[in-house]
Structures are given as structure tokens and as C-alpha cells.
Amino acid sequence: MKKIWKVSFFDETGEIINSSAYARYNKTQAFPESAGRGITRRWLHVQLVSYTARQISVALGFNESLAEAIALAHDLGHPPYGHEGEKYLNDICIASGCGCFAHNAQSARVLTILEKGGKGLNVSLPVVDGVLCHNGEALSRVYERDCEKTGSRLHAEIHNCLELPGYSKNIRPMALEGCVVRASDVIAYIGRDIEDAISLGLITRDDLPQRSVEVLGNGEAEIRKALINDLISESRDRAAIRYSDSVFKALEELLKFCYRSIYSKTIPNELRKERERMFQMLFQACCEQLAESEASPARTWAEGIGAAYVRTTPAERIAVDYIASMSDSGFEKAIAQLISSN
């Protein structure tokens, strides 16, 4: 694992937003770009997480700049096509014997290894740790920090997240700002995804669970405000970030509704199967390219990170790193080039 540098949090934000990975944030959030104009992309989700985390941090007297840096970096390792792409890469990793794939661990990998020619970004340990532990899919009423965590523990957790399926759901950040970002991730996406689903005609506002509506409201702004206000009220002068019982139950019910009525229906099954096939096809092609000495897109990308990376990283993991680094359009371009060359 590369050395994790320590700098001021102001400089960390600059490092992150000027990175190559940040420039490729134009990826699927929940719905594909082809779904229509105005549909949320991952770059907007990341900004909403940052906005939410800063609000909460200021109110609770936390380090606003640290929370912002974690939020802006938290999805740098997310692959094309959102969580569908993450599932495809995880299946590929398991089948090829090179571990597993989790976007939060990949984001930490981007920060520490894959940027700046293998040097990683100039960011501090709490930022890398907060990014690794941000898992917004693991909802909790209470978010506690791990006060005993050290740098060596963090390195071990990154490794385990890339080797052990499901490991990333059981780790906690060392700083309360990391807990704030973990909660902010859910707050930022749940209302926004509901609005996108309504605009696409997938659901109506009347479909939302009544108990959740009574507590949180039925619009994005209402939901976000209710969740932020409750989190601030319940967390002030406490050693953890937490929701009240009533708000958490409403949020839990709303999230279950979203998985059942929205996230399982973002794309047709036929397209899902076709994309899975394309991921597998590109992975195999990249592995073949890396086994050859001739210039190729995968080899050129890997060599751009550095000789040490090429020498010490299995071809299968390099191929996964390469695919995960792509935007949606970059992935489609790579597939088109692969098909035209055959």
C-alpha cells in the first residue's frame, strides 16, 4: 500500500477536485443518462453529499473541510453504470479468483494508488478512512466511530475489502466526520432518486409509504430537511451520529420502498444481461492485452500508473481497475473499439 500523506484539509479538497478520477464523475447514479434530460448523474450526487455533510458538520461543530473532502472523494472508484456495474465487476473478480469488488474500497484504492502515476493523491488518513467506510447502502440508526483505528488497521481494512465479500459493510470510520458522510450519502440520494423516478413515470408521489410521508414529507427538499434536522438534534453533544427512533423507522421503510419499486426497475432485464455480457467481454479482452507486449489501451493505461503497479498487480486486478476508472461513455467507447477490431 502506498504511503498516505498528511496535508491541510483545504489542500485535500483541491487534490480531489483536480484529480483525473473526479473528472470522470459523469456516470450513472440510479438511472442511465438515456432515461431522459435532467436525470441525476453521479457528479451531482457527490455534490449533494458534500452539501449535506457540510450542513451537518457546521451545526455540530465538526471539521467541515474534512467532511467535504470525504464526501467529494467517496465515489471516485465507482464503476460505470452505478451499482449494476459494481455487481458485474464483483462477479468477475470472484469468478477470476482476484478477490472481490466494492466501490468504497476502490475509491480508497484510487486515492492511495491509482492517481498521479501510482503515487496517489496527497490526502490524509482520515479522508481515506472516511471514503472506505462511507457505505451508504448499510443503513444504521446510530453511526459510531472506531476510536482505536490506526493507519495499519486502515491498510488491512482496504486489503480485506478487496478480498472478502461483504467485509466493507462491517467497518467504521475513525472520525465523526466520516460518520456524517456515511449518513449524508443516504440523505442525498433517497429523495433525489424518488424525484427522478416520479419524473420518469416509474412511481407516483401517492405510491410513497404513508407512514414515511407523515414523518418525512413526500418531496426531496422536505425529506432532506427532516433527516438533517433530526440527525443534528439527536447527535448534538453525543459521541455518535444518530437518528430518533421515529425518523429512522420512517427512513428505513422509505428505503425498502425504493429498493422494491425503484432500484430493481432502473433498466430492463434484457439491457442488464447485455451490459453484464459487455463487462465480461471487455474484462477478457483487457486480460489478453495485458498478457501481450504490444501497445494496447489496457497496457497503456496500466503503464501510465507506473512500472511498480504493472509489476506487482495481477492482470485481472489491473483489468478491473481499468474498467472501474471509466465513465459510462468511456466504457461504451471501449466496447465499440473492441467490437470494431474483431
Image: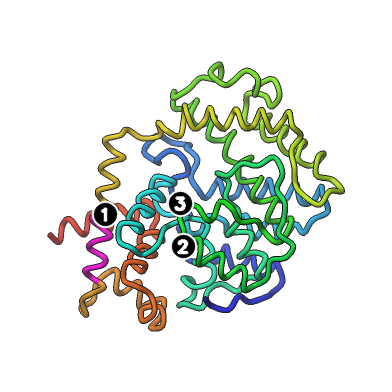
**In the rendered image, the vertical position of residue 76 relative to residue 223, given as above or below:** below
- From the top left corner, tell me how far across and down residue 76 is, in percent: 51, 59
Residue type at mark 2: give it: Leu
Label 3, label 1: how far apart the Cα atoms are: 22 Å
Residue 263 figure quarter: top left
**Mark 3 highlights which residue?**
26
**Mark 2 highlights which residue?**
162
The residue sitting at 62% across, 73% down in the picture is 152
The residue sitting at 76% across, 51% down in the picture is 57
Q: On the picture, is 230 further left or further right than 70?
A: right
Q: Which residues are magenta?
A: 280-289
Q: Nearer the viewer, residue 195 or 308?
A: 308
Q: Residue furthest right?
A: 237
Q: Which quadrant is home to the C terminus?
A: bottom left
Q: On the picture, is 337 further left or further right than 140?
A: left
Label 2: element kind? helix
Residue 37 figure quarter: top left
Does the stretch in magenta take in 284? yes
**In the rendered image, the vertical position of residue 25 relative to residue 262, given as above or below:** below
Q: Looking at the image, can residue 22 be seen? A: no
Secondary structure mostly taken by the magenta-highlighted segment of the chain: helix
- From the top left corner, tell me how far across and down residue 313 is, in percent: 38, 75
Residue type at mark 3: give it: Asn
The residue sitting at 48% across, 37% down in the picture is 38
Label 2, label 1: how far apart the Cα atoms are: 19 Å
Q: Looking at the image, can residue 8 be seen? A: yes
Label 2, label 3: how far apart the Cα atoms are: 24 Å
**Mark 1 highlights which residue?**
280
Residue type at mark 1: give it: Gln
Q: Of marks 2 and 1, which one's residue comes earlier in the chain?
A: 2
Label 1: element kind? helix
